Image (spheres, helix red, strand yellow):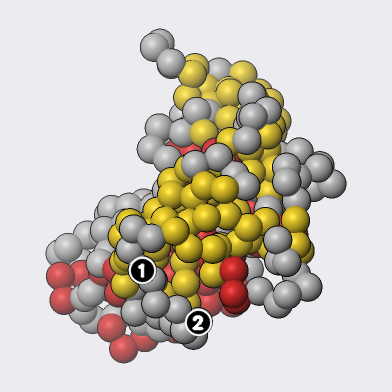
Amino acid sequence: MARVEIKQVSKIFTDHTAVSNVDLAVNDGEFLVLLGPSGCGKSTLLRMIAGLELPTYGDIFIGERRATRLQPKDRNIAMVFQNYALYPHLSVYDNIAFPLNVRGVDKKTTDDKVKWAAELVGLTRMLKRKPRQMSGGERQRVALARSLVRDPDVFLLDEPLSNLDAKLRHSAREELRQFQDRVGVTSIYVTHDQVEAMGLGDRIVVMQAGTIRQIGTPEEIYLNPADTFVATFMGSPPMNLVVTGDMTLGFRPENFLPKSHFPEASSVTSVTFRIHRVEYLGGDRLLYGNISGDLPETPVIARIPSSIHYTPVLNTDVAFAVANEELRRFDTASGKAVAQTATLPKRRTAHG
């Protein structure tokens, strides 16, 4: 295991800057997720840590070593890609053993390490199978075991679940988190899927246009986004944003509820909500519409759990509200979050 430090790293290609002045420290044994939309620079940053790309500026340290110019083979890292790159003609055993055979490790040590890694990821009974006889999640485990036998200081994972269907991705995500908990190797995971990021990461690094917008735990980033980009990128549906002038108010759909749901003494901001469409999700309902009243007329979404007995009426003005402690405030010009003590426009209680 090792700590990874990225100091003022930039990667400039001929026609664009992929990564710009990134500073980041990954703790020993941490599972860190690099999250962002396509083209944000997350995979380029991972490839620079791996040594597959050289930084234009800046330095990368793995443990105590300056790794900026080291060859990938000299960094003691293991990388799992979106394509697991298994050899189809080799058995699971031989796929796992491959990096040890290339290094000339003796047969007894190789056998011990393969069986240890296979047991760790639950492949002991599958060692004679070929990759084509396995599910996507099982092939992922083979790729992890093959990386594990190398005793890496750092695991780098580049969207390894993106080829799996939704159900398999969920189970593979659980297995990956359990694997990390057992092994404790420093891991850096790239994804564009905020559900994956929330479920896997000890901390999340949200990136956009080659820069870091926020670093924090899943809870910190979801509850207190640093800016409007993070607010709308994290969450499905995203945070509602209402521009009131030089201030933008944000609130999560699950916090936007019928006014009758709140106790009379609650401190809330009340609005008129006209619902245009209802989407049923089993345990929840999404209500799409426009608000008016105390806040400027704006399209918003409410997420109502089935446990709240509420019958939506389309195209009719109804009273909805959000608790004031759930409102987040952003500077409209910069998009950055401002102190939560900022004055709310037309702050009022449930009494009206």
**Image: 61 above or below 154:** above
Front: mark 2 or 1:
1
Q: Could you tell me residue 200's position as x and y percent?
A: 53, 65
- Classify mark 1: residues with Cα within 10 Å, few (<14), some (14-19) or many (20+): few
Which residue is label 1 attached to?
313
Give the crowd class for mark 2: few <14, some 14-19, many >=20 residues within 10 Å.
few
Amino acid bearing label 1: Val
Answer with mark 2 or mark 1, whichever residue precedes in sequence.
2
- The answer to which image quadrant residue 343 occupies is top right
Cα–Cα gap, marks 2 and 1: 15 Å
Q: Against 345, is 116 above or below? A: below
Residue sitting farthest toward the top? 14
| Horizontal side, residue 138 vs residue 108: left or right | left
Q: Is residue 213 left or right of residue 324?
A: left
Q: Nearer the viewer, residue 101 or 177?
A: 177
Name the residue rendered at 58%, 36% in the picture. 243
The one of 104 and 148 positioned closer to us in this rendering:
148
Point out residue 250 in the picture as x, y percentages from the top left corner: 61, 47
- Compared across the picture, whether 31 is left or right of 100 comes to right
- Which quadrant of the view contains residue 27? bottom right
Can you tell which mark lies on residue 308?
A: 2
- Write the residue at 49% across / 18% down: 17
Can see residue 98?
no
Tell me the quadrant of the picture where the C terminus can be found: bottom right
Tag 1's secondary structure?
A: loop
Residue flagged by tag 2: what amino acid is it? Ile
Disc number placed over residue 255 in the picture, else none: none
